[in-house]
Amino acid sequence: MNTIGVGLIGTGYMGKCHALAWNAVTPVFGDALRPRLVHLAEVSPELAAQKADEFGFAKATGDWRVLIADPDVAVVSITTPNQFHAEMAIAALEAGKHVWCEKPMAVSLADAERMAAAAQRSGTVAALGYNYIQNPAIRQIGALIAEGAIGVVNHVRLEMDEDFMADPAAQFYWKSQASSGYGALDDFGVHPLSLLAVLLGRVERVCATMAKPYPTRPTPEGGQRPVETWDIANVMLEIEGGISGILALNRAAWGRKGRLALQLFGSGGTIVYDQERMNEFSIYRADGSTRTQGFTNVLMGPAHEPYQHFVPAPGHGLGFNDLKVIEAHEVLAAIAGRPARIIDFAGGLQIEQAVHAMARSHHSGEWVTL
Amino acid sequence: MNTIGVGLIGTGYMGKCHALAWNAVTPVFGDALRPRLVHLAEVSPELAAQKADEFGFAKATGDWRVLIADPDVAVVSITTPNQFHAEMAIAALEAGKHVWCEKPMAVSLADAERMAAAAQRSGTVAALGYNYIQNPAIRQIGALIAEGAIGVVNHVRLEMDEDFMADPAAQFYWKSQASSGYGALDDFGVHPLSLLAVLLGRVERVCATMAKPYPTRPTPEGGQRPVETWDIANVMLEIEGGISGILALNRAAWGRKGRLALQLFGSGGTIVYDQERMNEFSIYRADGSTRTQGFTNVLMGPAHEPYQHFVPAPGHGLGFNDLKVIEAHEVLAAIAGRPARIIDFAGGLQIEQAVHAMARSHHSGEWVTL
Amino acid sequence: MNTIGVGLIGTGYMGKCHALAWNAVTPVFGDALRPRLVHLAEVSPELAAQKADEFGFAKATGDWRVLIADPDVAVVSITTPNQFHAEMAIAALEAGKHVWCEKPMAVSLADAERMAAAAQRSGTVAALGYNYIQNPAIRQIGALIAEGAIGVVNHVRLEMDEDFMADPAAQFYWKSQASSGYGALDDFGVHPLSLLAVLLGRVERVCATMAKPYPTRPTPEGGQRPVETWDIANVMLEIEGGISGILALNRAAWGRKGRLALQLFGSGGTIVYDQERMNEFSIYRADGSTRTQGFTNVLMGPAHEPYQHFVPAPGHGLGFNDLKVIEAHEVLAAIAGRPARIIDFAGGLQIEQAVHAMARSHHSGEWVTL
Amino acid sequence: MNTIGVGLIGTGYMGKCHALAWNAVTPVFGDALRPRLVHLAEVSPELAAQKADEFGFAKATGDWRVLIADPDVAVVSITTPNQFHAEMAIAALEAGKHVWCEKPMAVSLADAERMAAAAQRSGTVAALGYNYIQNPAIRQIGALIAEGAIGVVNHVRLEMDEDFMADPAAQFYWKSQASSGYGALDDFGVHPLSLLAVLLGRVERVCATMAKPYPTRPTPEGGQRPVETWDIANVMLEIEGGISGILALNRAAWGRKGRLALQLFGSGGTIVYDQERMNEFSIYRADGSTRTQGFTNVLMGPAHEPYQHFVPAPGHGLGFNDLKVIEAHEVLAAIAGRPARIIDFAGGLQIEQAVHAMARSHHSGEWVTL
């Protein structure tokens, strides 16, 4: 039995999610390579100590550089706000650590490029937290496409929508500022692009436009301030292999909570999926009698790798946090030198390049080739 | 009780649909102005006679000009292939008849313009057969938008998909030829654009691209012939009032049979609709407790005008043909000088202009302003 | 071309539905035997004249016996309140007419028996208006069962729910009185039983209980009056061939508008259906890879007889009134001596017997054998 | 910070589920009382050692009595086959331990009674593993009912279906034997009854029937052997407060994987739920305009206690295993003396009494009062 020392930087939304995954991966999968929860870093020693206690980490620090310097830490989870990813990831890689960094990779393309270069130099595992690709439904969809179950894919539609920016009365805040990025495009776009990357391949050309549903937002002082980011983005895509596509993003979409919807059209059928019902997908195949053709709704079960490690009975359902457990398992597989389903920093850079090309297209009003 | 003489040209898919509507409109609505089924024209006198008998028309002719010349005919249903619309409609209008012409208006923009001019000159009713706007669900959605039930609409997504061109083994035929038009863009695009027209307003700018899922198709002789039309079209829209949108069209979408899907996002809520389940729509409103917020699926019933004329009980369902009955009723209302929910030739021309602007954008790779 | 003279008694909900069907059946089906709309009867000559005009009947009368005596009437639609069915149907049958009578057959079992006897004596067609059996989806489900698509059926669940009695503040009215029947049991139960009859066979044993959600209802005078009928009924069934089943009926089910839901379990699969989405059904078949097994949702189209007579394209949807057109077509087929999909008075009597057996079981608390 | 020593007996389906819950409960909830994973028992020392290692337990034993005797163990998870529950639970209770025992409580009513008596004597926490009651959706439904959101509940329908016994070609095995219990009734019935217990109250009268879809099953020797259990059960219920209900159970229901469906009808609305889509429920309320009434589909989120401890964003989804984490948290709350949402042995005995009453009703053909 081998073990590997884990360090965790950050304990917010994704930090807790990583902590849960590191705790669960051995009981779920029972594999040979097992994480030891060694060190946790937060902004203050007090918070770090509290969270280390809750999450089961042995040591705590208010200085993430101490964690990276800890020789007992071999893999570092980076779950801090996006602007810190580059510095921390590069430091960890240069210290010879494996890195599991949350997405998006970085705020600027230059940072993403530096991260990818550091990963290439280090030779260690540098994985990004694109957990939706770990959904057994997505893995199954990928297998079906590879088998030709819907023939040759020729068209795709992707949508990602939530409603946390939908209230026009919500105040101007950091996500309204240009310093946070473009808006829906980089905040959301990376998720559907991660699915495209594992299911279909590279994006080759894009034409995009962004929109502001609320050009101004109230300020705490009672005035109105112009919003600097775009909550909506529309993109037309050309994907490797002559596949045409549409990508629509909206973080001001009332009623959508975690919609990440996919429509894949092929010469022999169609597959549709929505992350809001993450334990199912539907497939139409153009065979058999027309009297009984239709979309077949498939509930995930033990037949859909790696569902069976969580529950032996079908249709019982995985949750969002389970995807991170699967991801942790894939990161460990990569560290162990086995084939792994991860998007590494090189793959992540391609996603970032696509996002920034879309932003350029918005400003030029023209197609941009990647 | 007034009656009005009806002439019907064409008895195919839409011709039969018009015939059913003319037969049903009085029993359903019981209105004062009632159609008399006077004259039916088909390509041969024999077919005309047979169909006149089936559909209940008094006279039959193999020459549509005879029908238009019939003084007892006051309104003419034109349901022939698209390339004949202009000639027939203009002749009928010039003869002082009311015209109810199937969509799309015409194959060329020039023809559409001539038709609109003829309608303006005639002063009679010149209506187009955009029957989806007659769905009580769409009418209700329009009323809700007008009332501000979802606040100010700021984003819209439209999809129209069927699968009659989805089989790559299907032979090259007239819809594969450039003479039939652009492809999905004009074949399908006019339907969602008709919904936009009644729900939101004018399209102001477009950026479009079209795609061929199957660049060649087999010929009867056993070879392959390059396909000249695009079965897929993707469009980014800017609509009156600063509304951004996406329009996606695919007539090679396996499994989609009559999908015409709408997502309308507003500052206070969201409405979604799909014509494949034409007797319902869903609305999310950002009010009340977050514990019970969600999309409310509304089944059509007598509360949704003019459903109650068909069935007094809710949830029992109208069918596709019933939409044409409603449309006939609106055409008669217009003829009687009452307010009517129709898209006339002037409105139809705007739709055609949008379609042709999209085609220009595809070729230029740039945004086109209408 | 043969024609047949039609008489219509009653012009309410179902009367209008019959009138629409008689108007549409020839344009839709184009068959050889065609209805002529001869005579219409209502409670007053004035109403009869008005409705005859709207519905296209040549003659009108305030006395239904005059209509039955009319030698030009060969088939009589009876759509009056239930308590009149027996007298009118028997008179028509004794006059040698064909009869198309709305369901339920009669209020009392004795009346139903007299009607069945009269039908047997007359030798003419005596059909009941069980229109849900005419839905192409139900016809297709029947064909699939017959083919063994889901193996041997061994269990069935039926539900019928509406909400017109759901409001506890609604006043006591005639449906609250014992003279109207048992309540949901006979008001609703006959519909799912008609589906059982065409899909599976005879009900052999029943055990039932009824319930009153609101034991009293307000009266116009401001008091409360005990309700004499049961808005809810629960039944356990044994059906021919050893099939077990459950039947649940509720006319006080808030939110249900026209729910008539069916779950059919077999040794090789399952079929589910809900009349609120009448243009689709779902089938699960236990074959193929478990990775893609699931319920396939089939949208009705031209492959599903007789949909193609209404619309040539799939997925466009029939409506409730179209089912009556199909039923009229079947009645005409029966009159013409062709095989027809109808429930005749003998079949209707079996349904009534089942309903009354359920009521007896409620009172005895025991199983009742039919 | 207090800790409590945990012993786990059994490591199969539910044993692993408990192990995952004990590992996750502190990272998820961060509470003061924290489990220490002390001792694990399995049928052999080798398997026990292997699983203790995977699941993070300090000690392992092949003898469950050793675990119960361990003074460092304060709470015992019992996840062994049903016939062992009574002996183990009683031994643990008599040793002064808290017990968390999987359902069903016991195979015989006598055993369940002995367990309940032992629990009463011990005064420690004795909880049953009815994890579906822990679903935030069910908790929310309960709160809505309590608030009167759907008025006074008057009717309920419950269904539980899976398909692991659906294949007629599957061999006779232990679940086909009478020694395993009645069949679907006790195997499944306890789940919907646990929901009834927390949502509505006690079952007062029952009338039930059971059915065998496959009277015989193949044996390994090539013959056929009569099946001794019933895979289907149908029950009519009377519930505290005059609520009528239906309960339908089928473990031979092709296509159903984890269906546990609930329809709750009240004087002011309706709630529906299906565990196969465990992160949502629908509610219809009879208020507001009829134009926008319908079933509102509510996606679970942080507004639905205790979802927020798992994910801070709505609509992201919990999984089946998360329900056990919530349950572990409730067991710890009970141990800490705080109010807890658990079904204890006294409550479990009521469920068992209902199940056995249903079996008696099947044999007598009559209603049985509890």
Image: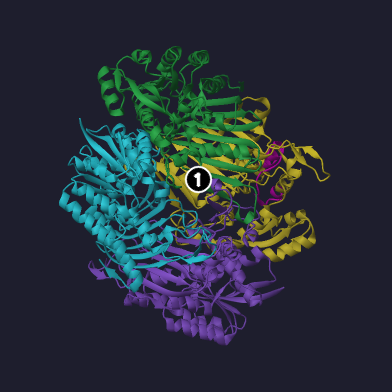
Chain colours: A cyan, B purple, C yellow, D green
Residue C80 % position (x, y):
72, 51
Query: Is C115 within the magenta?
Result: yes
Does A195 sit left or right of B36 as displayed?
A: left
Does A18 sit left or right of A71 as displayed?
A: right
Q: Residues within 10 Å of mark 1 (few under 14, many from 20)?
A: many
Residue A92 vs D246, above or below: the answer is below
Residue B109 % position (x, y):
43, 81
Residue B275 % position (x, y):
49, 60
Secondary element at image label 1: strand
- Of residues D331 and A15, the one nearer the viewer is A15
Read off the residue under disc 1. Answer: C273
Can see residue B323? yes
- Dividing the picture into quarters, in which one does residue D332 lie? top left
Residue D108 % position (x, y):
48, 16
Does B75 sit left or right of A180 as displayed?
A: right
Picture residue at 22% right of the left edge, 57% below the top = A114
In the rendered image, the residue lying farthest to the right is: C221
Q: How many marks?
A: 1
Magenta range is: C92-118
Residue C1 vs B9, above or below: the answer is above
Query: Is B261 within the magenta?
Result: no
**Chain letter behind tag 1:** C
Q: Quadrant of the C terminus of chain D?
A: top right
- Dividing the picture into quarters, in which one does residue C347 lie? top right
Can see residue B170? no
| Amino acid under disc 1 | Tyr
